[in-house]
Amino acid sequence: MDKTDFELRFTRGKHPSGGGYVGLRPGYRVDEKLGMVCEYDVPVTMRDGVKIYVNIFRPKAEGKYPVVLAWAPYGKHEGADDYYAMLPGCGGSKALHSEYARFEGPDPADWCPHGFIIVYVDPRGAWGSEGDLTFMSPQEALDGYDVVEWAGTQAWSNGKVGMNGVSYLGWTQWKIAAMNPPHLAAINPWEGVSDFYRELVFHGGIRSNFTAMFPGTMCRPRKRAEDLLAMAKEHPLFDDYWASKNADLSKITVPAFVVASWSDHGLHTRGTFEGFKKISSKEKWLRVHGRKKWVDYYDHVDMQRQFFDRFLKGIDNEVKYWPAVNLEVRQKYNVGNYRAENEWPLARTNYTKLFLGSSNSSMSTSPSTEAEQSRYSVDDLNDKTQNAFFEFDFKERTELTGYSKLKLWVEAVGSDDMDLFVVFDKFDRTGDRVPFPSQSGFDHGPVAYGWLRVSHRELDEERSTPHQPVLKHQREIKLSPGEIVPVEVELWPASVLFEPGETLRVTVLGSDLHAHEAWKHTAVRTVNRGTHVIHTGGKFDSHVLVPVIPAD
């Protein structure tokens, strides 16, 4: 759905150092290093005459080679370390790649010796490329189509083009692959949103703190860039503007090796799973890990090359024996075991209700007959005790893998709206919280996150399932004084193993306390004030639905 009946707002992007407006383009040059021919700042003309610039790294030996395309606005000629340095604890470092690799993208030094050409793109408006910089727009998709076709018809190309990369380099793969350029032969999206509104800019209707990263910190436009902050303020509900950024995933038919993680809640986890589920590719694979995404990406270059060997070179290899789904069941930080599966979500999942009990902050498989309340104030966002939590102790070894849902009956005292921030945590048998890698940049995250602005509670009945509610986000339904309403909070996919005596804690908070440390330069603005009331027991069937995987 690529409607354009809205007006884009633009801003001038500033260099992260505060050095003013920049639009760097170093100019065409060629050198040979590490057995590669490196061409810098090569112009490619789009269908409307606008020139964008690419860097090309190809094997020194003459011949025709497959092309792996990396598309993101972070600078094809800039090193990755400055971006990684912005995210302490992210695990990215110069030791992971050579000087030729760019942020979140393939390292030419790892690919060219194996008979691949790497093309890095500065999209329209980024750095020295002409035009205005937009994000996941219909124009960017058209440009992607044009660059794929250009790369597939060059003298050094064998006519097969793949796409590879993390985050933005994954988002663009959904968007461009849905255009079905004839020379695109395979994609490898490594953790990337597929629903711009629900997964990146708004979480449950609450504006994400990540939005401010574009374009000021992460992107450096030549002239001006789409102002996502301004657009988010003008378009707080899902409309044609946000729909124009989402690919029609059902149109994607090329072979796809999709990599998701349990550890990127708030950014890419949900969207990567949704992408895998909804694409129409007959040949598709899903790998799911629980580690930090950049380290995992550079640790698995061999798998990436093996996939592209098959679909860009026609090599008969082990890929045809890969399980459809290969996922890591987490136990604690960077500890887990991988297991092969046939589908996602797992067909044998036993979705189990754990009913909330306010009187003893517990959860039980049987509902309480007594109506109770949990209350917490939301006026002081720095007070970490302002929450309601509920615990369940496991009597036997239990694996939770998949989608969870929290149903609550809620009431706002002193307000007409509520922002609910939900986390799942694991506690070991000694009562210590078990931390997990989370949101790219920090080490003490929970098992899973969920968010909801209560005025956005209206469900999309056609798209929702019993275990995964999908919200319309098309209107606000405010609360009246004393009104008690049911809401369903989607918890993003997760996998965790509990031993006997270990505990699942579900916490409902009035602020995004677990996530704020990941992006300290921004803040989540909430509508919260007064007191939140959660009603449990009796006629209020507040519960969490968890995905129990049978032991056999």
Image: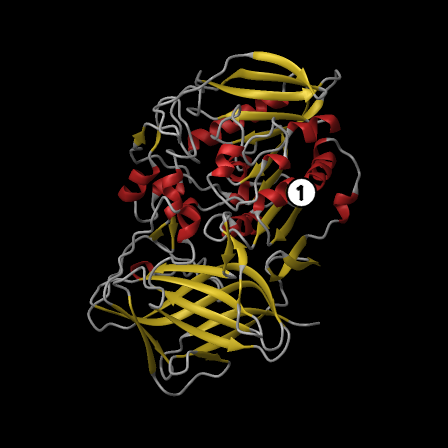
User: Is residue 286 in view from this perspective?
Assistant: yes
Under tag 1, what secondary structure? helix
10 Å crowding of disc 1: few (<14), some (14-19), many (20+) = few
Above or below residue 176? Residue 540 is: below
Q: Position of residue 520 (x, y in %)?
A: 38, 47
Which x, y percent locates residue 105? 58, 34
Q: Quadrant of residue 478?
A: bottom left
- State the quadrant of the C terminus: bottom right
Q: Residue at x 41, y 70 (%)?
A: 407
Q: Amino acid at mark 1?
A: Asp
Where in the figure is residue 275, as x and y percent of width and height? 54, 47
With 93 as the anchor, is 26 left or right in this view? left
From the top left corner, tell me how far across and down residue 25 is, in percent.
47, 17
What residue sits 60% from the left and 22% below the top?
151
Height in image: 410 above or below 381?
below
Residue at point 32%, 60% (across, down): 382
Q: Is residue 160 visible?
A: no
**Viewer-proximal residue among 467 and 437:** 437
Report the residue marked by disc 1.
299
Residue at image coords 54%, 39%? 170
Q: In the figure, residue 8 lies in which quadrant?
A: top left
Query: For the N terminus, which image quadrant?
Result: top left
